[in-house]
Image (cartoon, helix red, strand yellow):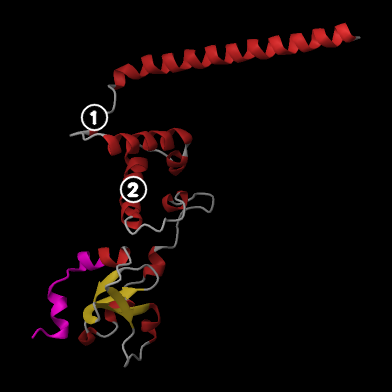
Amino acid sequence: MSSPNSTKLNLSKAELQILVTLNDPSVSFTKPKNKRSECWSNFSQIYHENNPLDYIICLQCKSVLKWTSENGTRVMSHHNCLNKFISTTPSRQRTISSYYQQSSASKECPLFQKCITEASVEYCGIDCRPFESIAGVGFMNLAKQLIIAGAHILIDSLAELIWNRWFFPIIINFIYWNRIKSIISDHNRFATIFINQLESILISV
């Protein structure tokens, strides 16, 4: 017969963090009955399938922390997640996460959103782009087209979908002249309508 604590050996901290992030129903949180420290106001012990684990969760940032009753509240007092989330940027500078809308009800969404957030940070940092660029119409359209392509075809490398950068000036010129022709066409059409209406008014007078 397995002991109630046998689950402790089966779940790693990383695996448990994923279950917490996905709001898995097998995971629950309960405060110890004999708690006396004020630190427990922001923490709870983690249970998996009603079995207590040697892990606690920070109720502020949802981080999983290794903990045993022998350690007391030391890991809690050293966590200080509130300090980690205080922004040191000017008030006019938005954080990367502020550009995302509210997560959907999908269990997979928080995990994918975390990966996308990290990739967005790398994109802005490595390419020296402002956070505003990921909220731009052009970036959103690029992301949309990549999602559509990924849903329909299998590729070995993203480079297979991205055109050689030497072709970009040609494509830009093509798009530019098409837009110009479209504007001229619209201008001529509106000009014709205006002239016809003006002639009708003059004739009626």
| Residue in view at x 61 percent, y 15 percent | 186
**Viewer-nearest residue: 16 or 41:** 16
**Viewer-nearest residue: 7 or 45:** 7
Kindly identify which residue carries mark 2. 116
The amino acid sitting under disc 2 is Ile
Residue 118 position, x and y percent, is 32, 50
Q: Callout 2: few (<14), some (14-19), or many (20+) C-alpha neighbours within 10 Å? A: few
CA distance separating discs 2 and 1: 19 Å
Task: Say if residue 86 shows up in the picture.
Answer: yes
Kindly identify which residue carries mark 1. 159
Residue 135 falls left or right of residue 182: left
| Residue in view at x 27 percent, y 28 percent | 161
| Residue in view at x 31 percent, y 64 percent | 21
Task: Say if residue 67 shows up in the picture.
Answer: no
Would residue 10 be counted in the magenta stretch? yes
Would residue 74 be counted in the magenta stretch? no
In this picture, which residue range is highlighted in magenta? 1-17
Residue 97 position, x and y percent, is 42, 53
Query: Which image quarter holds the C terminus?
Result: top right
Q: Quadrant of residue 127?
A: top left
Identify the secondary structure beneath mark 2.
Answer: helix
